[in-house]
Amino acid sequence: MKYSIILPTYNEKENIAIVMWLIIDTMKKRDYEIIVVDDSNDSATDKVAARIKEEYPNTEIKIEKRKKKLGLGSAYKHAAGIVTGDFVVIMDTDLSHNPRAILDLIAEQERTNTDIVIGTRYAGDKSGVDGWPTGRKVISMVA
């Protein structure tokens, strides 16, 4: 199976390298691609992603730079048009999701043979998001 990991970005120059590196390290034994859809109003995020792409030439990385902020849903739709994987993983690039959890999602899909697996940081023994202000937690839970 091949996995397409979509990373929508908007001014994520501080996080994009960390997220990409964690994905590359986590997925090293899997067939996968990373698709960065960048709506940033600067050129820093896509330049950092391009540098990671150069450092990992054996990793399939696509960088889609868009001219303006078109929104998260639009980024998903854009990436859906170019994915080549059998399964799609959507990750936030702000590190609110740990890329290492991708393997848990894959394991659950393989165990249940389902078409869709959804992860949440609000379930299980280690639920929640440490360090977030209460307002952000509430908004995140109802979003």
Image (cartoon, rainbow, N blue to C red):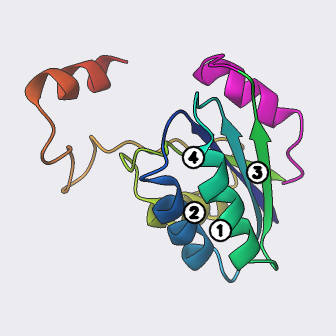
Q: What residue sits right under mark 1 in the picture?
A: 52
For residue 120, above or below residue 113: above
State the image coordinates of residue 7 (x, y, percent, origin top left).
Answer: 62, 45
Q: Residue 12 vs residue 80: left or right?
A: left
Q: Marks 1 and 3: CB-CB under 8 Å?
A: no
For residue 32, above or below residue 124: below
Q: What residue sits right under mark 3 in the picture?
A: 87
**Amino acid tagged 1:** Ile
* Residue interval drawn in magenta: 68-85
Give the alpha-carbon distance from disc 3 to disc 4, as whole Å: 29 Å
Q: Nearer the viewer, mark 1 or mark 4?
A: 4
Label 2 or label 4, whichever comes before in sequence order = 2
Q: What residue sits right under mark 2 in the picture?
A: 20
Q: Marks 2 and 1: CB-CB under 8 Å?
A: yes
Label 2 neighbourhood size at 10 Å, few (<14), some (14-19), many (20+)? Answer: many
Label 3 or label 4, whichever comes before in sequence order = 4
State the image coordinates of residue 107 (x, y, percent, origin top left).
Answer: 57, 66
State the image coordinates of residue 35 (x, y, percent, origin top left).
Answer: 74, 49
**Amino acid tagged 2:** Met
Residue at far front of view: 43
